[in-house]
Amino acid sequence: MKKGLLVLAASLLLPISSFAWIPNMQFQITHYNAVVQVINTTPYNAYCQGYVYGQTQMGSLVNSWFASYVPAGGYAYAYVYTSYPSYFVNAWAQINCQ
């Protein structure tokens, strides 16, 4: 009986602790860099990771890896860069937080 309750409690708590969500993000694009602001709206510290992408005017893609702790109610920045003569026309990100 005790073992059954322990297994039940562990199976209920494990999905909660491993839950990941997509955070709120804001984007700013200039000619040679794209900035993503990852916003943690929860009251808990979050570990966020994923990729940031930028598309140049010629259609090529540039990406960078982002991994950072984001404080409760705070934000972190992720960047991707290009150089002359290419410039960014679009940016997006695939970032998940836990």
Image: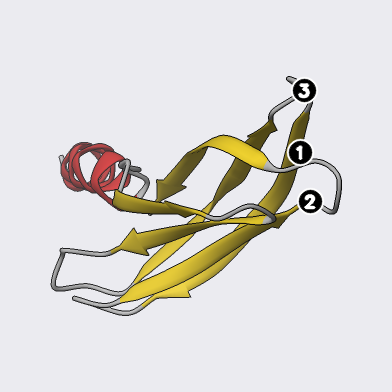
Farthest top residue? 59
The image quadrant that residue 81 belongs to is bottom right
Q: Nearer the viewer, mark 1 or mark 3?
A: 3
Residue pictured at 69% horizontal, 28% vertical? 57
The image quadrant that residue 52 belongs to is top right
Query: Callout 3 environment at 10 Å: few (<14), some (14 to 19), or many (20+)?
Result: few
Q: Alpha-carbon distance for marks 2 and 1?
A: 7 Å
Quarter in which the C terminus is drawn: bottom left
Q: Alpha-carbon distance for marks 3 and 2?
A: 12 Å
User: Residue 9 at what x, y percent from top left?
Assistant: 18, 46
Quarter in which the N terminus is drawn: top left
The mark nearer the N terminus, 3 or 2, is: 3
Q: Left of 96 or right of it: where is 42?
A: left
Look at label 2 and name its amino acid: Thr
Look at label 1 and name its amino acid: Val
Out of 29 and 15, give the one closest to the viewer: 29
- What residue is pinned by disc 2? 82
User: Residue 76 at what x, y percent from top left?
Assistant: 43, 72
User: Residue 78 at what x, y percent from top left?
Assistant: 55, 62
Out of 33 and 74, give the one closest to the viewer: 33
Out of 36 and 29, give the one closest to the viewer: 29
Residue pictured at 37% horizontal, 60% vertical? 38
Farthest front residue? 85
Residue pictured at 57% horizontal, 34% vertical? 89
- What residue is pinned by disc 3? 58
